[in-house]
Structure formats: C-alpha cells, structure tokens
Amino acid sequence: MKRMRTIDKNEELISKKDLLAIYSISYGSLYRWKRKGLIPEEWFIKKTVSTGQETFFPKQLICERIARIQSMKEDVSLDDLAKQLSGENEDNSTLELWTVFGKKNFYFRDIEKIMLTDNSGEIRDITEHIKNFLKGE
C-alpha cells in the first residue's frame, strides 16, 4: 500500500486562484492533472472563506509539482509522468530536517545533492554516504 504524505496544519498554503495565475495554467489543466494522478487528491484543501468556499494547496509541494510537470510535459506523456510522480516502484525514503524554523521532509529520490560545510569552511558532498546508509551499507 502506498504511503500517503500527511499535510502539516501549519504548512503554508496557496490559493487555487493564485496558483493558476503564477504558473499561467488553466483550471482545466489543473483538474486534468488531478484526474491523471499528477496531483494527489489530498493536496486539494477546501476552506471556508468570507466569499464562500475556496481551494488551497500546500504551497511548497504544489509549486514544486507544477514546475516539474511543466518542465517535463513536452518530453513525457502525462500517463508516464503520472507513473513517475506516483512513486510506483520507487524508494519512498525521506530525509527529515529539523531546524529552529520547523521541520521539512524531502523524498530522497528528489534530492540531487546534500552538501555539508564544516567549521573550517570545507564543503563536502555527502550524498553518496547517505545513499549507502539507506542501502544498509
């Protein structure tokens, strides 16, 4: 069974109206991507506002996803893209970072590099060390 990521109640949200404007996408495209499984159902958050009901999304998740869809949709079919984004046959390991500003989760499959700067200013790429750790090596 696929693990669903829960939305943190303190997570910053973006309205559907703002999302459509920022990314110049149509209402139809957004809901087509939802039907195809490119955008998870649980990311569509209904809230009551002074003018009625409005749809919001977890800002960082949806903005990253829309940018990824837009950058790949010319080269990959929506069905193939949906398979990639759904995590089928993918490692769902996450990296969770805790700071004084809160915590943030990243799917390891989405991380390109993890860089560590020590007290002397030396910068080291520790990505392979983390990958090996996840493999149990």
Image (cartoon, rainbow, N blue to C red):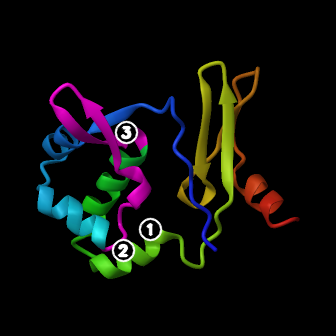
How far, Cα to Cα, is label 1 from label 2? 6 Å
Within 10 angstroms of label 2, few (less than 14), some, or many (20 or more) residues? Answer: some
- Mark toward the start of the polypeptide (3 vs 1): 3
How far, Cα to Cα, is label 2 from label 3? 21 Å
Whether label 3 touches label 1, CB < 8 Å: no
Q: Amino acid at mark 1?
A: Leu
Whether label 2 touches label 3, CB < 8 Å: no
- Mark toward the start of the polypeptide (2 vs 3): 3
Q: Which residue is mark 3?
A: 59
* Relative vertical location of residue 92 with respect to residue 107 in this rendering, above or below: below
Q: Quadrant of residue 48?
A: top left
* Relative vertical location of residue 12 with respect to residue 89 in this rendering, above or below: above
Residue 76 visible in this rendered orientation of the protein? no
Indicate left or right for 116 with 11 as reference: right
Report x, y in % for residue 104.
59, 37
Q: Which residue appears at 30% of the width and 62% of the height?
A: 69
Q: Quadrant of residue 105?
A: top right
Q: Amino acid at mark 3?
A: Lys
Classify mark 3: helix, strand or loop: helix
Foreground tag (2 vs 3): 3
Mark number for residue 81?
2
Classify mark 1: helix, strand or loop: helix
Report x, y in % for residue 91.
65, 68
Whether label 1 touches label 2, CB < 8 Å: yes
Mark number for residue 85?
1
Q: Is residue 40 magenta?
A: yes
Q: Amino acid at mark 2?
A: Leu
The N terminus lies in quadrant:
bottom right
Q: Which residue appears at 29% of the width and 71% of the height?
A: 35
Q: Which residue appears at 67% of the width and 47% of the height?
A: 95
The part of the chain drawn in magenta is 36-60
Q: Quadrant of residue 3?
A: bottom right
